[in-house]
Amino acid sequence: MLATIHGDAPEPPAPLMNQPPGQRRSRLTVAGWLLILIAATPFAARVNDDLHASTRLGGSQSAAVESALQTRFKSPFTKVALLRIAGAPAADSPAGRAVLTDVTDRLQAVPEVSGLASYLDRDDSLFVGEDGSPIIIVGLNPPEVSADAQLAALAAQLDALRPGLAAQYPQIAFQWTGEAAVNADMRRISARQTHMAELRVLPVTLLLLLIAFRSPVAALLPVLCGGLSIVVSLGIVAAVNKVWPASILVVSIISMVGLGLSIDYALLIVSRYRDSLREGLTRREAVLEATAHAGSTVIVSGSAVVIGFGAMLMVRISEIRSIGLGGLIVTSVAVLVARTLLPVLLDWFGPAIAPDSVGTEAAADSATLWRGWARAVTRRPLAVLVVATLPLLLLAAAARHLSIDLPRGQWLPDSAESVKVLHDINGVARGNFGQIIDVILDLPPGVRMQDEAGWRAATKLAHTLGRDPRVRHAWSVTGLNPMPLGGPEILGRLPEAVRHRFVSEDGRSTILELLPRKDLVTPDAAAFVRELRAADAASLTGIAGAHLEIGGVPAFNADYEDAIRHTIVRIVAGVVIATLLVLSLVFRSLLIPLKAVALNLLSVAAAFGAMTLVFQDGFGISLVGLSRPIEGGFPIVPVLVFCIVFGLSMDYEVFIVARITDCRRAGQSDEEALVEGLAGTGRVISFAAAIMVMVFFSFMFGDFVLIKILGFALSVAVLLDATVIRLALGPALIRLAGRWNWWPGA
């Protein structure tokens, strides 16, 4: 095949159809990627406008309760926003009631509002903050437009009201929070911080690439591939989001992983191309050589990363699935760009990428350095094994104390206005409005709320739960009774809208809303939900055959944690088994895949240990931009870190082992193949890891605590993997195993 390639002498231009097939394919490849980029850019530019910051958990009890609120009860408060009127007179004063009346009248006229709950409904002090400010629960209809537009319409109504009220109350302000408001702010902040992270890392990335290649064009190629991969992937996600809603976290993941992987793959292929030129091959031959060897390595490496992200689709949580989907997309795009577009660019810009006088001496010095290190490892593999393993095991031991409970403190970004309002409301409210628990009582067959037995059961349940020290107040239909001795006949006197809010149409079910005390933190609220679900409904209601369903934010949090705990073992097993199969088929070996998986697990454990020491134990916590340790963690973190790190860590293992395999097939001994394999990839891995660490590290400077933890964990994992594990521990194990590494294939 190489014998048919002509030299590098320029040829006179010819019509497209008369040019060699390779030239036509090259132009079609570039044109195809340009068309894809043009098509994806408009979608990518708007991706943050449509992605959601909330999480969905299909098939859970909390989701079933939410559905029941919409269908069986026709509750106007399935989706809500919270409004605090700051700077107004106390709600229980005549002036305050007048202001509250003006506000509620204005909101009730808005089509987006399905219902209101405030101090005006009944003289309930729970809707009055300790500072006297009114707190209104605003029920929201499913938006016909975006949630952002829905909130904008509500804010516009009150903005039109404010000038008239400001004449009497200059400090009056309408402060919105709740899921929709927080989601809108999260989208804006995520877009801004992702952009800032990319701007921070780009100059450092270009500098490192310039040092690596000593050529501006060669330094720009990996960045170009990374930018193309990110834009195209975001465009695909934006299109998929129309039918499968995705989480806002996917933007940060695509940016981090897309840039890091694209640079890794470009570094590998460009370095192999330059090595081939130094060996005397022509530009066309060098392109074919790099594509055949390094390009195949990219496919194997990408397959390992895809396995990690694909495992996330096993979890029923929407944000984890969307991150897995985003990772699958960006990895696939990065591999396609590296395998199709990059070889064309190498062929077109070859002289600028690898001029004869640039980089040869530096590359030779680097190869000599890594060759010397490899010979040192092969001489004393056991000593290297002990010295490299001990610190990693000590770091991994700290992971035993890793907590995956929800954080107890305030972890949402304070730069979001809705988050500030949420904290303000929590500070002045008489209960925890962000942790309301919905309890549905399903009566046994033959019993309805219109019956005395059903009414007594609901009354007993409300009294029992209302006396729990964790509950500030229990709202129920039985509590709406103005007469202490009244019974189910009261239902006929209630307005239909109020009755349907608490009692299903068939009368078989009723709902209680529990307002927790303000000091009940998120993990304790989730524990309360688990306790209610495990309780005997008959003893709580006094009627046999009764059944309870628990929903609300605390119930969702409990379902969220349980879904991850029940899936994590299957995820780990699936990733490990799939990786073993892929590597066994590629390298025709049993020991190489087992060693790679074991080292990956050690890398993940060390990253977990570092997370524990910093974010939970507080060692160096100020260096990551936090004032104190996090009390708890995030259930999503172990899944994300394991799946992402396991895939990315395999990158460098595949790079090294593939190069060693090539050397063995060229006739070198096991020891010489190990030395030359490390010498040929050590420089690439060093620069690739340094850039990837910088990419992940740049995301630690934002306000999202979850992204901060991910950026830290991925930085540590890649740093340890590319230094201690792949360049010391891994080669030592290969040297000790000798020819058994390649059994049964060799």
Image (cartoon, rainbow, N blue to C red):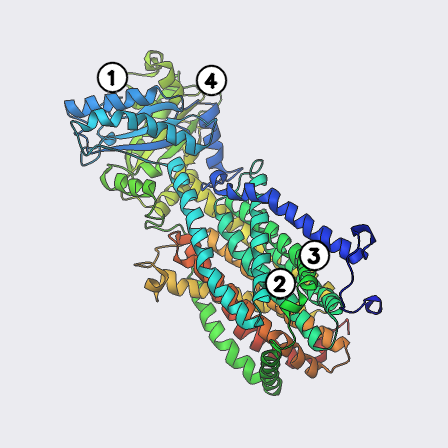
Depth check, front residue: 698 or 656: 698
What residue type is disc 1 on?
Met
Residue at image position (20%, 21%) is 98
| Residue with the mark numbered 2 | 265
**Up-down: is 506 above or below 628?**
above
Label 2 neighbour load within 10 Å: few <14, some 14-19, many 20+: many
Label 3 neighbour load within 10 Å: few <14, some 14-19, many 20+: some
Question: Which image quadrant is residue 184 in?
Answer: top left
Label located before the other in sequence (2 or 1) = 2
| Residue with the mark numbered 1 | 483
Give residue 478's position: percent from left, percent from top: 32, 22
Quick check: can you spot residue 430? yes
Between tags 1 and 3, which lies in front? 3
Q: Which mark is residue 640?
A: none
| Residue with the mark numbered 4 | 506
Residue at image position (70%, 59%) is 344
